[in-house]
Amino acid sequence: MTILNDFLHLSIWFWMAWVLIPIIMEVVPTIFDFFILLKRKIANKKLPELDYVPEITLIIPVYNSADTLYECIRSVNDSTYDSKQIYIMLINNQTKDNSFEVFCQCQKDFPDLTINWMNAQQGKSKALNLALFNSYGKYIIHIDSDGVLHPNAIYNMVKTFEARTDIDCLTGTIMTNPEQIDDTKSFTLRLFRKLEFFEYCQAFLAGRNFQSEFNSIFTLSGAFSAFRKSAILKTQLYNTDTICEDTHVTFQIRDNLKDRIALCHDAYFFVDPIEDINRLYIQRQRWQRGEIEVLHMFKNKQMKAGKGFATDFVIRLIMYDHTFAFPRMIWYFALICLAFLSYPIQLILESVLLMYVLYVVAAFLLYLCIILFLAEEKELRRYYARKWYLVILFPLYNFLVFWFRFAGIVNAIKGKQTWKMKNLSEEYDTAEEVIKKDFRTFARIIDCIKSEVNTHEEQ
């Protein structure tokens, strides 16, 4: 009986320490998000149609974009928005391929579009600023050249602006292109790309949708975002001191100008899926490093003073995303060590399984919300709904991405700001070389000791 009581006592503390923490940190907030998203969907009223369409400027940065630029501009031409009211500016940022020839072809093939080519030799941020100063119209929309717009994307975004005068900036809903995902020949890569598609849906239709309710969107997506011209020109424009200039603009508008930022959930922009795991590793590192840089610029004093956790969502985010990243790392590795600290293996495995099930349940709740928000896009909704099985695999994908982001935190601490980053294979080769070097050093030390001992013995 005493042994049983001791075991139960041990079990209680185990479950409290290793199950309750992830429930409080991740599962409970997701359930809260679920109900907020349901409320947002129910309360979402259909916006009135536009009586007229104002003139807009569409800015597209170009850097070695020959393979994707034509389809990008074609999607603009196929838009339901009046082509004559769209002024397109292609900002050439020292491209080295035949993107200019693609631009010339687009002028011939899409005569209703006004397309101008502008050269910039000072990097992406300054190129975008040059475009802003030369823009026309009431709204400025920025899209990347490696994606395509949904036909109603521009119209829905302008309609939201016209109906919601309190909103000065909008981010569109970014998704990876379903057609390219289905055309992927490799089973492993296709599954990986489906998980990425699933992630984007959650990030925008769940994450940013929830954040819109509280004006707490952290980043206006650089791939597809829009501004009232009167708002963006009040800022310091795009900053050259960070690799995440879109996040910097977001903070300027919300924190400095006190303007409202929101998601236009029915304005879709489809980007190319990730090429391989190396590209995903670089991408997530860049996002993480850019996040740290911008936070240092805007929240450095608050973070040093330890203020704002209860009142500032950005401080809470940095605490969870960065400060808690190191304890989470220790927490993951400690699971392995528990087997050597008298914890029963069965109990450890059951606890890990329970945590995994809870993560799956949380992902499933968001999956249901996203289906509701895709109600007007039947084909896209059907495509997403058929990916229900990804709910089971999604926690594993998030676990992998966590380590990529963690690497971004570490590299941001010890590295310099740069767009050029090592991919996962290069990081592995570097680590392997360091380990070999350390063992060679250790081996040399052992040889020296042996040599010294043998010398003394001979004497």
Image (tube, helix red, strand yellow):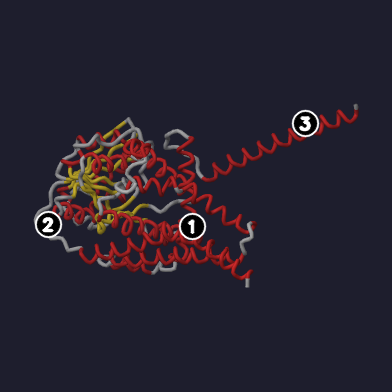
Hey, which residue is sitting farthest right in the picture?
458
In this view, the mark in front (3 or 1): 3
Q: Secondary structure at mark 1?
A: helix
Residue 177: percent from left, percent from top:
36, 57
Q: CA distance from mark 1 to mark 2?
A: 42 Å
Q: Which mark is residue 410?
A: none
Residue at 43% x, 47% y: name it. 284
Can the viewer see residue 223? no
Depicted 347 relative to depicted 417: above or below: below
Disc 2 marks a residue whose amino acid type is Leu
Disc 3 marks a residue whose amino acid type is Cys
Q: Which mark is residue 50?
A: 2
Please give the residue where the numbered disc 1 appears in the rendered image.
189
Residue 187: percent from left, percent from top:
50, 62
Residue at 51% x, 63% y: name it. 15
Q: Which mark is residue 448?
A: 3
Residue 272: percent from left, percent from top:
38, 52
